[in-house]
Every structure is written in C-alpha cells, then in structure tokens.
Amino acid sequence: MALGAAHRLQDGIAAVETMTRFALAVLSVASGVYTYLGVRSILDGSATAVFFAAVIYSTAVSVAIYAFWSYMARFYPHVTSATGRTAMLGVMALGCAMIIAMSSWLNAAALAGSAALEQHLAETIEDYTQDLDQAHQNALAAQSLLPDIQRASERFSRLAQQEQETGALTGTTGSGSVVQLLSQMAAQLKELENGITASRERVTTLFDDGRKHLATMRGLVSAPGAIEPRADTFATEAVALSGVIASLEQTSIAASVKRAADDLSLGFIAPVASGAEAGLAQRQDQVMETIRTSVTSQSKVLSAAADEILARKPVAERRFVPLSSAEAVLRYASDFIPSWAGAISIDLLPAVLVFMLAIVHSALRRQEDALPLAERITAAELIEALRVSRAVTAGMPDHAERMEAALEAATDSVDDAPANVTSLDLAGKTPRKGPPA
C-alpha cells in the first residue's frame, strides 16, 4: 500500500509539472502587464520613450518573477536539512519583498490608481470646503457688531433730536453745541455701520464665487473619463479657490472696526459751549462730559469685541499637491486593501505552489524511508550494482566462481520475490494505474 501511494505521488508530481510551469508563466505575464500600466502612469517624457521604458521594465519584472519562482519550485522541496530550509525561507522572504517593491505596488497603481486619485481629489475638496467656511465665518464675524453700532448711532441721533426739539439734556431748545456733538457721534457710528454693511455684500459675493469653484471641482471628481485631464482642471480650480479664500481673509472689517472704535474715544473733541448765558454754558459742558464718558464706554465695548474677532485663528494657506496614481495608491493604501491584496497575490501566489510541492516531496520521502530496501531499489540500480560487482571480481580469479554464484542467487531471489517488489522486467512492465477518479 505504501509503495502504491508513493507511486501515485510521483505520478502526480510529474503530471503537474507542465501545469506548474504554465501557471508561473501566466502569472508572470499578468504581473508584467499591470506593471507596464503602473510604470506608464509615473514616467514623464515623450510617448515613445515612455512606451519603451515601460515595456523594458515590465519584461524584466516578468522574467525575474518567473525565474525566481522556478528556482524555488525546483530546489526548495528537495532541501531537507533545517539549516537549508531556513536559508531557503530567508531567500524566499527577501525575494517576495523585492517583488512587492518592484512590481506589486505598480500592479496596485494599475488596478486602483484612478480611484486613488479620485479619493485624493475628494479629500482635497473637503479640506478646501472647511477653509472656505472658516474664512467666511471670520469675514462675517464683524457683522455681529452691527446691531450694537446701530443702537448706539440711533441713540445719539435720538438724543440730538430731543435736545434740539425739547431741550431734554440742557433744558434749552435749539441747535447748540450738545446737538452738534451728538450729531457728530451719530454720523461717525453711521459711517462705521455703512462700512460693515458694504463688507457683508463683498463677503457674500466672494463666498458665492468660492461655492461655484467647489461645485466645479466636485463635478470633476465624479465625471467619467481619464483622470489626468480632470486632475489638471481640478488644480486650476483649486488655485482660483485659494485666491477667493485669501480675499475673504482680507475682507474682514474687524481691524477697521477696532480702529474706528479707538478713534471714538481718542479722537473725541468736544466743542466749546455755545450758550450765551453762564448757566446754559455750564449745563452744556456737563452734558458734553457725560457724552464723552458714554462714547468712551461704547468705544471700549466695540474695541474688545473687535479684539475677540481678530484673535480668531486665520485660515492656513493651503496648496494643492497633484499626485501620480502610484503615489496616490501608496498614500491611501488603507482605502484600497482589496486592490493591494489582488496585486500582491498575483506576484506571490507561486509561493503556495512551492509549499505544496515541498509538502508532497516530504510525504514521498517519509513513505520511501519506511519501505524495505528491496522495495526501494529500482531495476536499473540493481543491474548497475551487478555490473560494478562483476568488474570488481574480474581481477580475483580465485573467488570468481563463488561471486558469480552469489550474483546469480541474488538475481533469482529478486525474480522470485513477492508481488510488492519492484519488477526488473522493464519491457514487460505494465503502467501503473493512478488513483480512482
């Protein structure tokens, strides 16, 4: 039974040898084709130069992969010592690493390069969207000061009107120094209000332009066709969007509000009391001092609010960096694990065949070692042994007859051996049957 199993393993090894070579050739060619596609995506130059360079590199990769795995399939199964097996495994690991370095990542670039570039463009859009929103918020932050400025302006205007019509502050009607001062403060605040309102319109226009650029960029990511021309157009839109974001950062009126708020108190100039009577002039001076205090308080509030806006973190300058398909596959490798697995499997699948052959040869050796010598020796080996023995005894006439008789007895014993002994009759030997289908 053991002899039959050994024969079946030997027949199986011989039967799959051609298939093994065919599989190695097909896998090597497939890896070379995808390597060619990956190399073309990273080379620059004329079309002819890129074509020949890619063909030469991919051919070299195919030959190297086929040769490496052919050597491993030929030698590794027959190395039996632990030291030899360890050394061969080390060589295999080194070869696998080199194959991944020179071929597998290019295969992945060919399989998932376009998708990786689209992933890069999509993440870039997310970054630019965040930058645009942040710049828009920073630019609109000064708009939060508008209600306070409007209330202060309206309050000064209302007081000026009341003082002019009813003398609510000094007790004397008419357009005196107090009315002039109140009207002056109301005009300054109104001017600041108009500046903030105008900046809001500018911010809205810029923000709309930025959203248009983002919409175009999103359309480029999802559009069909080759990725390279889309990436070039995307880069153009990214530059334009960066300009819009920079403009939004410069449009913020918070610094202007702070300067205007400081001017309200630092540049406060009260007019000379215009009252003809001493009592009226004194009342006007008292009211104008009260107005000065109110203006100073209002100035501090606006200046503090402007400082909070100016303390916001500005939008960092962003520059779009184009990537090749191979670089994109490496950067976003975690998002394309199936493609990487397929690219590596094409190159390293022969390792499975090598280990299968090693297991079969190991089992074959164990079965042969368990057989008696008479079942392990072949007819050719026995005939060669007899021939050597005759040559040795040719120079020993005294023992020639005894040696000849011993050889004839040995031959007869082999002929009369049981059926499980290997037959020496090569001409009449029938082919062994394989395992049942």
Image: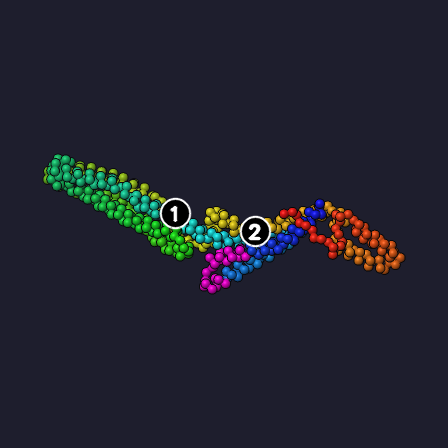
Report the residue at 34% width, 45% height from top. Answer: 134
Question: Depth check: 433 or 403 in front?
Answer: 433
What mark, if any, has residue 126 been given in the picture? Answer: 1
| Name of the residue lying farthest toward the right | 398
- The three-letter amino acid code for the residue at tag 1 is Glu
| Residue indicated by mark 2 | 348
| Amino acid type for the residue under numbered disc 2 | Leu
Q: Earlier in the sequence, mark 2 or mark 1?
A: 1
Does residue 279 show up? Answer: no
Residue 423 drawn above or below residue 296: below
Relative image position of residue 176 (x, y in whole percent): 13, 41
Q: Residue at x 40, y 57 (%)?
A: 229
The front one of 182 and 32 is 32
**Few, some or many residues within 10 Å of mark 2 (<14, 14–19, 20+):** many
> Badge 1: how crowded within 10 Å, few (<14), some, or many (20+)?
few
Image x and y of residue 435, in percent: 66, 47
Instruction: Say which element carries label 1.
Output: helix
Q: Residue at x 81, y 53 (%)?
A: 411
Q: Is residue 186 left or right of residue 376?
A: left
Q: Is residue 233 visible?
A: yes
x, y (%) of residue 22?
Answer: 59, 56
The segment highlighted magenta reads 28-52
